[in-house]
Image: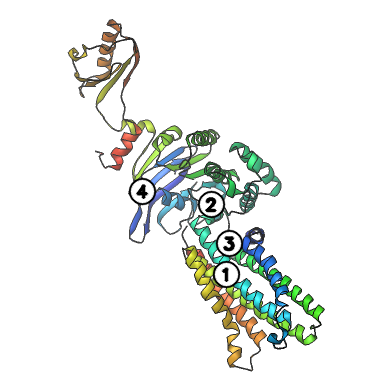
């Protein structure tokens, strides 16, 4: 009950936040602007492929910053006290934040991708192969974003300074999330999509479990 | 255990690494009591309160609310307690209405009930006109009222308030005190911390003095004041166009006379004297001299004096 309520509550808050407004409008705009890239530089790949990579990377990083800084700020301003004196599980507070930001992000990336696909459709680059390529990169992007969001929460729970949380999220969050595609560069037999999905789910679960453990031990 | 004991601390200690915040404190608060918890900054007031509301779970000792151990059975005591924190903020994007709805729903209230209750609370705290305003646009005083409002949503039997009057201007402080008095009259048990002694004296019917993590004294304001012997001092104030009587030195038992101004004097009396007898003698003398007495009182120490004596360790 409280998780659902908190999720809807956080969703409402994040959906209206400045960062999310930037993502809602900025990422589709980016998709539109990417069509002006010289097609030769895309090495035969469709716009939507590039869009899914770029927006998931930017979106993931921004979300990690938003999550880490908002959690630190809420800790500093004792926001959680008003929740925790009620019959609310600490795990629900953290999970609701993760799910709300991740949902917003997936929607923002999907909108951008649709814009990219529409552009590809108009320019005649939309073949089945291109669609598969785009879908694959979207899965990798979504897996990477899940890790980035959980890392953002990790720094939010652990750190007590907003600037430190932001810096760590920018430099470590996006770097660590790219690990999920790194093995495919060295081991050719690995399916990058399957690997990204497996690592995405596994790492996100591990990091989120650690987050919940750390948050449950905090004394407010 | 007596049935009307509402809150009970039994040998509670709390450490923050090497710092001992609470040192084996024990006290009881009875149902309907307004308990003023006073002490200097860092005395351990907020730690006590956070233990009581369940925000600090890592402590030694036992805390019971109506006999329920707060460490073992949290589900039940959530409903009993309303908590007005000292500093807690609200997320900036919320409106007053939205904050109340979220916290109300999380407290288990139904939407229909919450709609009416929100209106009731907003009327009580005079924030009706701000119901749909964003919290970020509220003033400091309104923010403080909002903290109180959220604490009252689920009609708690016990209200815990951490420094509820700090940072308020005099008008807002008066309003706030009136609200607390109104709540106290309705039978809610209130524990509030403060370091503003006049406020504590205005509101509380029992006062606990905390210093360096230890309870120094608990009692009614009168009990605390009479717990100190400041000497037998009579204060006499006469009307402006009347003169002070200057022959009181001759009265047996009068040690010295201190003229504060043209209309006010303090008569220091022998500490072994029969106070009722000497008051009668002095009053007769003043009446014989046709002094126009405005006030005549045996001085008691102020709460501030009592507090400072305990804090400075000047108690016997």
Q: Residue at x 42, y 52 (%)?
A: B47
| Image x and y of residue A102, in percent | 64, 69
Residue A98, compared with residue A135, is above or below; it is above
Task: Classify residue B266 by image quadrant.
Answer: top left
- In this view, the mark in front (4 or 2): 2
| Image x and y of residue A110, in percent | 72, 72
- In this view, the mark in front (1 or 3): 1
- In this view, the mark in front (2 or 1): 1
Is the residue under label 1 in contact with that under label 2 (CB below 8 Å)? no
Task: Classify residue B17 by image quadrant.
Answer: bottom left
The residue indicated by pointer 2 is B89
Mark 2 surroundings: few (<14), some (14-19) or many (≥20) residues within 10 A: many
Alpha carbon separation for disc pair 4 and 2 = 23 Å
Residue B311, compared with residue B279, is above or below; it is below
What element does badge 1 sit on?
Answer: helix
The residue indicated by pointer 4 is B43
Q: Please check whether the numbered discs 4 and 3 fall on a single chain.
A: no
Circle number at residue B87: none
Alpha carbon separation for disc pair 2 and 1 = 22 Å
Q: Please check whether the numbered discs 3 and 2 fall on a single chain.
A: no
Q: Is residue B182 left or right of residue B297?
A: right
- In this view, the mark in front (4 or 1): 1
Label 4 or label 2, whichever comes before in sequence order: 4
Q: Is residue B221 left or right of residue A67?
A: left
Q: What chain letter is assigned to the residue under label 2?
A: B
Quadrant (top left/top right/bottom left/bottom right) for the C terminus of chain B: top left
Circle number at residue A93: 3
Task: Classify residue B260 by image quadrant.
Answer: top left
What element does badge 2 sit on?
Answer: loop
């Amino acid at each position: 009950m409280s998780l659902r309520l908190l999720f809807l509550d956080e969703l409402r808050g994040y959906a209206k936040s400045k960062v999310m407004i930037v993502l809602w409008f900025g990422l589709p705009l980016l998709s539109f602007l990417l069509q002006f890239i010289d097609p030769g530089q895309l090495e035969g790949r469709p716009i939507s492929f590039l869009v899914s990579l770029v927006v998931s990377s930017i979106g993931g990083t921004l979300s990690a910053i938003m999550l880490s800084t908002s959690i630190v700020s809420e800790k500093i301003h004792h926001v959680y006290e008003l929740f925790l004196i009620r019959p609310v599980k600490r795990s629900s507070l953290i999970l609701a934040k993760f799910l709300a930001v991740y949902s917003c992000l997936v929607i923002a990336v999907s909108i951008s991708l649709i814009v990219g696909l529409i552009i590809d459709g108009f320019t005649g680059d939309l073949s089945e192969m291109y669609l598969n390529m785009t879908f694959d990169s979207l899965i990798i992007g979504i897996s990477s974003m899940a890790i980035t969001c959980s890392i953002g929460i990790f720094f939010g729970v652990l750190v007590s300074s907003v600037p430190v949380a932001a810096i760590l999220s920018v430099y470590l969050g996006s770097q660590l999330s790219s690990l999920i595609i790194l093995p495919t560069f060295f081991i050719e037999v690995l399916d990058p999509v399957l690997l990204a999905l497996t690592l995405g789910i596994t790492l996100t679960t591990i990091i989120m479990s650690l987050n919940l453990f750390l948050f449950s031990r905090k004394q407010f | 255990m007596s049935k009307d004991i509402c809150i009970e601390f039994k040998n509670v200690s709390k450490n923050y690494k090497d710092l001992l915040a609470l040192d084996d404190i024990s006290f009881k608060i009875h149902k309907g009591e307004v308990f003023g918890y006073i002490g200097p900054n860092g005395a351990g007031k907020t730690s006590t309160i956070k233990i009581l509301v369940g925000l600090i779970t890592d402590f030694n000792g036992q805390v019971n609310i109506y006999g329920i151990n707060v460490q073992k059975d949290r589900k039940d005591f959530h409903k009993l307690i309303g908590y007005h924190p000292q500093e807690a903020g609200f997320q900036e994007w919320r409106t007053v209405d939205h904050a109340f709805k979220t916290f109300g729903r999380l407290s288990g209230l139904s939407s229909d009930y919450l709609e009416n209750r929100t209106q009731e609370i907003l009327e009580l705290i005079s924030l009706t006109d701000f119901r749909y305003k964003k919290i970020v646009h509220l003033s400091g005083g309104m923010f403080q009222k909002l903290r109180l409002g959220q604490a009252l949503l689920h009609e708690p039997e016990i209200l815990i308030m951490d420094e509820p009057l700090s940072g308020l201007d005099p008008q807002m402080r008066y309003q706030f005190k009136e609200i607390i008095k109104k709540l106290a009259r309705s039978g809610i048990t209130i524990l509030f911390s403060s370091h503003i002694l006049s406020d504590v004296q205005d509101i509380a019917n029992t006062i606990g003095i905390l210093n360096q993590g230890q309870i120094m004294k608990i009692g009614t304001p009168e009990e605390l004041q009479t717990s100190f012997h400041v000497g037998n001092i009579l204060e006499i104030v006469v009307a402006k166009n009347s003169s002070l009587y200057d022959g009181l030195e001759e009265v047996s038992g009068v040690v010295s006379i201190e003229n504060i101004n043209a209309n006010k004097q303090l008569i220091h009396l022998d500490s072994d004297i029969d106070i009722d007898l000497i008051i009668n003698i002095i009053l007769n003398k003043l009446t014989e001299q046709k002094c126009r007495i405005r006030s005549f009182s045996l001085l008691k120490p102020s709460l501030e004096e009592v507090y400072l004596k305990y804090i400075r360790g000047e108690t016997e």
